[in-house]
């Protein structure tokens, strides 16, 4: 009897041991890879060719071609971040919306201001970082009259000894990073037609990639590649019109039937409307050096009044993959066919290697789109692996993964003579231009975004070149819960929210993730916040002089310390009521934001300062 | 007596001129209108008979009236035939009304049955004081946009969707069908099945402002072949200017006041709030029927639209004479 | 003359006087030749002391005229002014319903801003609109800050604009133009 009992107990213990071994083998416990960074086999990791090891500099707004906005510096940790102090500050002298991140290369900090797009080079080796040179390009003041959402600039890119940036009046310039002398200036956009340029150029393979702005002005969208050495145009791919203009040729394979066909950029519009159809490229471009492919999204179609433009309106509100050398399209996926609510698709595209089970990873792209869905797509062909809502949506039912098509809720499309109410997400979407950051350590995407709904009425829009082509009255307000902003940490593999932080004001600033385990972002009333990357606990905050809508960065200073820099200057579309001194009594002002931001003028004023923080020596 | 009769005939004859022509409810050029005319005739005949009977009965009563005096003390007794006459009269009225109701019901139902299967769609958007006409096709790049005129193929059921950009108007082409309102904020519709080839005139039938009277619509009903040819011609972009004068006109139209409101396909003029001018010279009238299309009238219109149609939305620009010549020359090119 | 006759004559005379009201003139044709936008300055500083500038009679003719303000309201939407200025609240362009006027808040100064354009992005509409249309627009723009008499403004918004009707707009003071920034 006793023998049987002992035998049983031994068997149970043996089974338990085996189970424990098996369980630990397949759990999410981190294991170490060669470089020492913790890698969870179930986590997404940044695409390695597009995300080289961090050298302590910050050479482009997205940090790397994979758009991770992740700094591998780990001096600042949740334990010591409370000790961050201001090391120095710098005023640009301009008080428009300040969106551009400072760049740091070779112990020099480059600050790019909104119009008049001045560039300051600060010498970080000297105390107080005095300017080495100032570059004043003098773009035309009239460009401010055709810039829909503030005369902002989203940053410059450093490459091979030069800074490349776009001016509001449609010029792209190359500036010598040592001396501040202009090397070349190329005019790409025409403000007479309503075109401006606000995006940060992506520079890779000797090419400067520039896209236009003006989807609200009835312009035609395009992405152009200039030769980095000479500034000459290499190729230009339009977002509407015949295939030869859109550079869609024999290499093009759409992932879904809805995007495959001849001259769809003409056939999916009423006659002539594609010429004023929008699809501008005013947001972010990502690049995969291993396949020489660039990825970017296009803006909304024009006008906002959808009744004037029946049809799917290709190639607006979707994502293109193109060969960087020739511009030929590889694939296109239209996230929002026949857009109804100004849901552009220009948001940042993060390039990751995505786990699909059995320890396998595929090259993927992940992106929180303006229409409220977090897309995971195979970046080789564009197929959607998943699209889950990361914010509150009541105008779309979901994405049909078989056909790839977005399914709108019937009856909520705005038509003339009727006000459509309670449209969520509002026109700026669940998230607008301000990019998220990805931490390969936690495997999470840190998304600063919005919780806004709106009422919308449309009427016939008139087209006069150089004037707005909109045809809509909009009034925005807080979504469910009453908070206008949200900071969400999203697990792209589990496809769910890990934690979220409710913010009173909309979040219009990008996020910064660091290897030390601290994530940074700023609010529109000026608070620069540091949170714990694992659980979102607020660790430290600092009140800057104006609202924060610009990108925070982290770099290694000449003394080896880790520095965090953030621009502070409210404006942009959400902050226009302050930076442009608008009147809140008209709720439709600023394309609807006046109603949502009535309290902002009392809380913050315009400004233009860079704040740089570090731990004391 | 003869002279008075002759006089009456001469006076009433011109009134009958309204019974024929391009804008008449008795035209019978559309299926709805034909059935309406039949119904109208039925009503007319029935009511005429009843009228004659009533007037006849009244005359008989007057002729046979008896003078009653208080002294005679006659106790008036109703004649026995009066009661049966009354019963007969009631029955006659009941039959007549029932018949009319049934006739009306069947006409309405037959029109509804026809309306179930339209074979093509047109959208008409009314503005003050012109008609925006859009031929809808499933392929959106083949949509045709024109103004103030409607072409329809004979024998084909057309569904016309009606919308308004400002106030309530009413779509009325009497030769084809009845009236249907265009109400801002709603989409209404009317079905037209033209049966006779020809030219007809429609009219806005709901007071819509100062130029309500000058808001006509020219409807051309033609064979299917002619209709498709017209549609293909309308799809082409505008003809390019051919002479230096036309080129000067093209430059003025596409860069000055005209392009703020008007669209001419294939040119930089892409205004969306005025009538489409791409094929202006192929239309029969100017300004929604205000005057017939001719070079002289076009000059008058472009030079001073406010004198021709006071209060309408096109301003009097005050063109210099050489600009006027150039602009009209270019507009004449837009066939 | 009988008292009845006298009363009727008096009533008719009163009506005739009323017809001369500024509010009521509906001049659809305007003066195509000779109607001009005057050359006026938004400035308030003149070397040698304050100049006496006689006010243009068209200021009252347009500013108190219901037809002109109504036409201006339609043009404000049709010519895409709404796209930059919204319904007075501003956006790409400055707010028009407040008290600050960068380039002057009188109707003739507003008309000049519309006709000539202004630095910082206001397009020049001369040649794209007739002078009469520009005056009408200027009259409407001035009415957005409550300057026009309440019997001349429209009593309901034509568009789905969510702003209160102009008959309830408070009259803003017109601050001098040197309150401009940038």
Image (cartoon, rainbow, N blue to C red):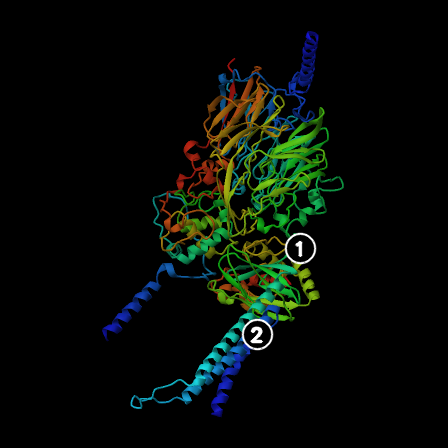
Of tags 1 and 2, the one toward the viewer is: 2
The answer for how far apart the CA atoms under marks 1 and 2 are is 36 Å
Q: Position of residue C140 (x, y in %)?
A: 43, 52
Picture quadrant of residue A156: top right
Residue B109 visible in the shown view? yes
Q: Residue furthest right?
A: A250
Q: Nearer the viewer, residue C41 or B227?
A: B227
Q: Position of residue B20 (x, y in %)?
A: 58, 76
Q: Do marks 1 and 2 share a subunit?
A: yes
Q: Position of residue A559 (x, y in %)?
A: 56, 15
Element type at marker 1? Answer: helix
Residue labelled with disc 1: B142
Give the numbered dot on residue B26. Answer: 2
Q: Judge from the rendering whether residue C142 lies leftward or rightward of residue A143; answer left or right.
A: left
Q: Nearer the viewer, residue A562 or A229?
A: A562
Q: Judge from the rendering whether residue B124 lies leftward or rightward of residue A585; answer left or right.
A: right
Question: Against A363, is A396 above or below?
Answer: below
Name the quadrant of the C terminus of chain B: bottom right
- Tell me which chain the residue with mark 1 is part of: B
Q: Residue furthest front?
A: A1
Q: What crowding class fits label 1: few (fewer than 14 Cα within 10 Å), some (14-19), or many (20 or more)?
A: some
Residue at 56% across, 62% down: B324
Picture quadrant of residue A200: top right
Question: Against B53, is A415 above or below?
Answer: above
Residue at 57% across, 69% down: B201
Q: What crowding class fits label 2: few (fewer than 14 Cα within 10 Å), some (14-19), or many (20 or more)?
A: many
Give the numbered dot on residue A448. Answer: none
Question: Against A247, is B269 above or below?
Answer: below
Element type at marker 2? Answer: loop
């Amino acid at each position: 009897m006793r023998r049987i009992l002992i035998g049983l107990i031994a068997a149970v213990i043996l089974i338990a041991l085996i189970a424990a071994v098996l369980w630990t083998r397949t759990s999410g416990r981190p294991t170490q890879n060669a470089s020492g960074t913790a890698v969870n086999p179930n986590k997404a990791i940044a695409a390695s060719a597009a995300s080289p090891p961090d050298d302590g500099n910050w050479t482009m707004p997205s940090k790397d071609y994979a758009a991770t906005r992740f700094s591998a510096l780990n001096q600042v940790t949740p334990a010591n971040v409370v000790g961050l102090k201001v090391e120095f500050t710098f005023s640009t002298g301009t008080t428009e919306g300040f969106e551009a991140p400072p760049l740091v290369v070779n112990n020099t900090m480059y600050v790019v201001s909104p119009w008049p797009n001045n560039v300051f080079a600060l010498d970080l080796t000297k105390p107080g970082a005095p300017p080495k040179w100032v570059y004043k390009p003098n773009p035309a003041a009239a460009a401010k009259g055709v810039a829909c959402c503030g005369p902002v600039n989203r940053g410059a890119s450093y490459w091979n000894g030069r800074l490349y940036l776009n001016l509001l009046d449609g010029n792209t310039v190359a500036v010598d990073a040592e001396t501040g002398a202009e090397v070349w200036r190329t005019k790409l956009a025409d403000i007479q037609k309503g075109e401006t340029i606000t995006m940060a150029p992506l520079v890779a393979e000797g090419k400067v990639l520039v896209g236009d702005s003006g989807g609200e002005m009835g312009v035609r969208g395009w992405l152009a590649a200039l030769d980095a050495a000479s500034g000459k145009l290499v190729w230009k791919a339009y977002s509407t019109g015949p295939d030869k203009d859109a550079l869609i040729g024999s290499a093009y394979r759409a992932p879904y039937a809805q995007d495959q066909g001849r001259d769809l950029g003409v056939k999916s519009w009423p006659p002539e409307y594609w010429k004023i159809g929008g699809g501008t490229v005013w947001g972010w471009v990502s690049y995969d050096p291993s396949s020489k492919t660039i990825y970017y999204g296009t803006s909304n179609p024009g006008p906002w009044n959808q009744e004037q433009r029946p049809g799917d309106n290709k190639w607006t509100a979707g994502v293109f993959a193109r060969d960087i050398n020739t511009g030929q399209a590889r694939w296109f996926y239209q996230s929002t066919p026949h857009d109804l609510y100004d849901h552009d698709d220009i948001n940042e595209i993060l390039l990751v290697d995505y786990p699909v089970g059995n320890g396998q990873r595929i090259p993927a792209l992940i992106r929180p789109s303006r229409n409220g869905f977090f897309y995971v797509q195979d970046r080789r062909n564009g197929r959607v692996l998943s699209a889950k809502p990361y914010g509150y949506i009541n105008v779309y039912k979901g994405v049909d993964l078989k056909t790839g098509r977005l399914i709108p809720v019937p009856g909520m499309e705005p038509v003339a003579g009727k006000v459509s109410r309670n449209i969520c997400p509002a026109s700026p979407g669940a998230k607008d231009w301000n990019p998220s950051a990805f931490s390969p350590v936690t495997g999470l995407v840190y998304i600063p975004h919005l919780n806004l709904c709106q009422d919308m009425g449309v009427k016939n829009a008139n087209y006069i070149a150089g004037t707005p082509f909109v045809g809509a009255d909009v009034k925005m307000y807080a979504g469910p819960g009453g908070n206008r902003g949200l900071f969400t940490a999203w697990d792209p593999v589990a496809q769910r929210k890990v934690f979220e932080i409710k913010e009173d004001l909309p979040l219009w600033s990008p996020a910064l993730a660091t290897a030390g385990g601290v994530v940074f972002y700023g609010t529109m009333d000026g608070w620069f916040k540091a949170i714990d990357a694992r659980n979102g606990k607020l660790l430290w905050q600092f009140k800057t002089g104006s609202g924060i809508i610009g990108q925070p960065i982290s770099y290694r200073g000449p003394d080896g310390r880790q520095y965090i820099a953030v621009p502070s200057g409210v404006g942009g579309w959400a902050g226009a009521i302050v930076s442009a001194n608008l009147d809140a009594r008209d709720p439709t002002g600023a394309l609807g934001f006046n109603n949502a931001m009535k309290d902002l003028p009392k809380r913050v004023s315009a400004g233009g300062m860079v704040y740089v923080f570090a731990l004391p020596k | 007596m003869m002279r008075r009769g002759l006089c009456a005939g001469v006076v009433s004859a011109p009134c009958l001129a309204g019974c024929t022509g391009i804008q008449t409810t008795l035209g019978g050029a559309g299926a709805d209108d034909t059935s309406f005319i039949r119904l109208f005739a039925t009503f007319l005949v029935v009511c005429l008979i009843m009228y004659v009977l009533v007037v006849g009965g009244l005359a008989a009563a007057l002729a046979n009236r008896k003078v009653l005096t208080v002294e005679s003390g006659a106790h008036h007794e109703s004649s026995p035939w009066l009661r049966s006459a009354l019963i007969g009269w009631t029955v006659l009225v009941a039959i007549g009304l029932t018949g009319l109701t049934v006739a009306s019901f069947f006409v309405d139902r037959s029109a509804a049955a026809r309306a179930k299967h339209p074979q093509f769609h047109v959208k008409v958007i009314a503005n003050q004081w012109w008609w925006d006409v859009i031929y809808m096709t499933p392929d959106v790049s083949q949509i045709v946009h024109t103004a103030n005129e409607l072409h329809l193929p004979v024998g084909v059921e057309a569904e016309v969707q009606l919308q308004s950009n400002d106030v309530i108007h009413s779509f009325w082409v009497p030769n084809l069908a009845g009236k249907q309102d265009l109400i801002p904020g709603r989409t209404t519709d009317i079905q037209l099945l033209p049966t006779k080839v020809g030219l007809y005139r429609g009219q806005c039938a709901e007071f819509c402002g100062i130029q309500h009277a000058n808001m006509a619509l020219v409807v051309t009903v033609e064979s299917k072949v002619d209709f498709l040819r017209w549609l293909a011609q309308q799809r082409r972009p505008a003809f390019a200017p051919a002479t230096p004068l036309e080129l000067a006109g093209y430059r003025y139209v596409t860069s000055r006041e005209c392009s703020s409101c008007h669209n001419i396909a294939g040119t930089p003029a892409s205004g969306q709030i005025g009538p489409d001018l791409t094929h202006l010279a192929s239309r029969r009238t100017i300004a929604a029927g205000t005057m017939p299309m001719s070079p002289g009238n076009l000059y008058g219109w472009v030079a001073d639209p406010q004198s021709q149609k006071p209060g309408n939305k096109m301003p009097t620009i005050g063109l210099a004479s050489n600009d006027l010549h150039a602009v009209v020359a270019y507009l004449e090119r837009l066939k | 003359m009988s008292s009845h006759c006298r009363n009727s004559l008096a009533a008719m005379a009163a009506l005739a006087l009323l017809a001369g009201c500024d509010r009521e003139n509906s001049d659809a044709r305007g003066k195509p030749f000779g109607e001009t936008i005057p050359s006026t300055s938004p400035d308030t500083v003149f070397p040698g002391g304050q100049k006496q500038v006689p006010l243009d009679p068209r200021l009252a003719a347009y500013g108190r005229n219901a037809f002109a303000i109504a036409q201006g309201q339609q043009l404000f939407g049709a010519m895409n002014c709404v796209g930059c200025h919204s319904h007075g609240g501003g956006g790409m362009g400055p707010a028009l319903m407040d008290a600050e006027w960068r380039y002057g808040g009188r109707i003739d100064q507003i008309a000049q801003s519309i006709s000539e354009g202004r630095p910082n992005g206001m397009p020049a509409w001369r040649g794209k609109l007739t002078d009469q249309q520009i005056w009408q627009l200027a009259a409407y723009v001035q009415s957005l800050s409550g300057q026009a008499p309440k019997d001349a403004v429209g009593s309901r918004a034509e568009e789905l604009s969510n702003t209160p009707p102009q008959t309830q707009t408070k009259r803003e003071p017109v601050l001098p133009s040197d309150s401009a920034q940038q």
